[in-house]
Image: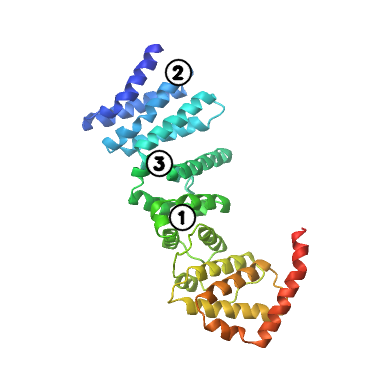
Amino acid sequence: MFLRVRFLELVAQNMSHVRDESESKTFFKKLNQSLVNIISGEDNTPQLLSSALNCFGGFGPASIIQEQSFLAREASDILMQVALDTEAFDEPVRRTASEALNRLTQAALYPILEKLFYLISDSREVDDEEQLVKERRMAMNRIAKLVTSPALRTQWTEENQTNMVFTLVAAVMKSLNAEEFRQLMQSASRLPIVKEKHGAPLIEAFFKTCDLKSTRNLEAMTIVGQVLSPGVEFNFVEPLNAAGLLSKDVDLSSEHGVYHTRVLHLACQTATADNVEVLFRYVFAQLKKVVSANDIPASLSVLEALLLAAVVISAKNTKEPLKELDDDAFQASLSVLLEKVGEVEPLLSTR
């Protein structure tokens, strides 16, 4: 047993020096299988397990040098399974697996990202729902750490960043709940290429594969909007029109209406000079319809978003708001509506 441990330690330290391309693939496949047999075997010891796990941690340099990224992906799969399995492995062994995964990632970032993306994707078929949730949570936490790790800064190439943005926004959105998607957007917003453009790449990635026709997609866009930086500009008129959202009235009583107006508010915040007029006309037309009803809409969130959108877009169109507001009937109806809202607010806050 002592010799097996020492041999594995020697292999872990020197596997990156294997240079014969014709032999390396066979060598690493055999090594991988041997390590798997050790980890799944019944006669292993903590020392032998740790040595095997450290060998997996050394697959990073080898996978890059030999251009065999499957080595890093397969190694990461084993290390993640061990790190998560609290029943089969003691805490010291699981900690060793986690540390080995860190070393593997430092040498081969992108193959590990691919594995993490897969763990949070909707293309998986897993019978154990609890295991799926554990793996997804682990993947999201690791992604958050990878984005901010100083040790990985040189590996965050523009290509890696672009791939991550597109994958997180578009490819995995359908498999996540709102809180999970929010966590990933916060991670993506810390990438240099996203920060440089105040978050615009997140919006661009969204519209490469998604539209604003469903309530879920509208909600997702509001989450993207929460991680944008001040100063970002984007023309939302085209996707809003494509979804038919500027040609029909806002639904004042549905969840769809809430997210419709929140995306409208986001569109006003990011509006460019050439689409201010369109947004201004639509926002004030909707606001007038709500106000003229002389009653509180079913959803106060819709009213709030419309008022915020009106304030934001008015600041970008300094002349027109005065004309719209210079209407005695509108002012009177707005005063009545706000008074009614003020009366019900205390009741809402006590619920």
- Which colour assignment does the render follow? rainbow
Which residue has dot 3 on it? 150
Residue 292 at x, y percent in the picture: 68, 82
At label 2, the amino acid type is: Gln
Counting residues from the N terminus, which is met first, the one under dot 3 or under dot 2? 2
Labelled disc at residue 47: 2
Which residue has dot 1 on it? 169
For image coordinates 44% across by 60% down, the residue present is 198
Q: Bin the neighbour count of mark 1 within 10 Å (Cα to Cα): few under 14, some 14-19, many 20 and up.
A: many
- Res 72 → quadrant: top left
For image coordinates 44% across by 30% down, the residue present is 99
Residue 3 at x, y percent in the picture: 37, 12
Residue 133 at x, y percent in the picture: 56, 42
For image coordinates 50% across by 57% down, the residue present is 227
- Res 252 → quadrant: bottom right
SS of the residue under disc 3: helix
